[in-house]
Each structure stands twice: as structure tokens, then as C-alpha cells.
Amino acid sequence: MTTDDSETPETISLEITDTLDLHSFRPHETADVLRSYLDEVYRLGIQNIRIIHGKGVGAQRKLVRTILSRDPRVVEISEPPENAGGSGATYASLAQPKA
């Protein structure tokens, strides 16, 4: 019997809503998770989203906002009010999918 010590990525299925909470993902998964999420919300026609990345030292916030700013489907990025996450979250508006 042999054992394989390599780590196989686990597939996780999530309900797609207007909010993505990144707390349940490892930092190195953030970029892939966010890009997949953007693909799905765009496909579903969800135009206003909130990404919860946490406050921390700001590394996740910077990564999230960099990815959003480089995605041509994203037309606006803003910081929510404190009662919606403040600096621990990011709002984004997406263009309407082309029919």
C-alpha cells in the first residue's frame, strides 16, 4: 500500500448569493475563489455584490480590490458602511451580462 502525501484540492459547492464571505477559505485560495464567484454572479445576472474579507492587516482587502479592479465586468468598487462590514468588506457593481 502506498500513501500519497500530496494535497488534493477539495471541491466545495456554495450557494451563490450577492455576498461572498472569504473567512472560510485559506488565503492562498482567495484569488481562485473570487474569480470563480465573479464568473457565477455575472452568469446569474447578480449586479451588486459584497465581498467580506475581514479587516486584519489589509492584505486580503488589497488582493480582493486588485482582482475586482482588473476585471472588465466590474464597473464600480466601494467600501460599505460600518453596519455592512466597513473596511472589512468591499462592494462591487457588475455590468449587465450581454444577452
Image (spheres, grey):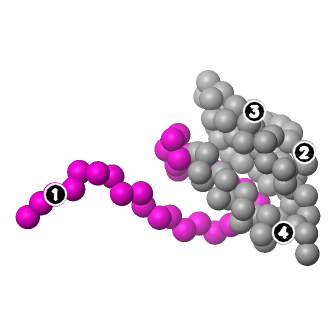
Which of the 4 quarters of the picture holds residue 40?
Answer: bottom right
Q: Earlier in the sequence, mark 1 or mark 4?
A: 1
Q: Mark 1 is on which residue type? A: Thr
**Tag 2 residue:** 76
Q: Earlier in the sequence, mark 4 or mark 3?
A: 4
Q: Which residue is most to the left?
A: 1
Q: Is residue 67 left or right of residue 77?
A: left
Q: Residues within 10 Å of mark 3 (few under 14, many from 20)?
A: some
Q: Mark 3 is on which residue type? A: Ser
Q: Earlier in the sequence, mark 2 or mark 1?
A: 1
* The stretch drawn in magenta includes residue 5: yes
**Tag 1 residue:** 3
Q: Position of residue 7 (x, y in %)?
A: 33, 52
**Tag 3 residue:** 87
Q: CA distance from mark 4 to mark 3?
A: 26 Å
- Secondary structure of the residue carrying tag 1 is loop
Q: CA distance from mark 3 to mark 1?
A: 44 Å
**Tag 4 residue:** 45
Q: Is residue 47 above or below residue 54?
A: below
* The stretch drawn in magenta includes residue 32: no
Q: Is residue 7 left or right of residue 73?
A: left
Q: Mark 4 is on which residue type? A: Gly
- Secondary structure of the residue carrying tag 3 is helix
Q: CA distance from mark 2 to mark 4?
A: 16 Å
Q: Position of residue 69 (x, y in %)?
A: 81, 40
Q: Are marks 3 and 1 in contact (CB under 8 Å)?
A: no
Q: Earlier in the sequence, mark 2 or mark 3?
A: 2
Q: Are marks 2 and 1 in contact (CB under 8 Å)?
A: no
State the residue in front, 15 or 9.
9
Q: Earlier in the sequence, mark 2 or mark 4?
A: 4
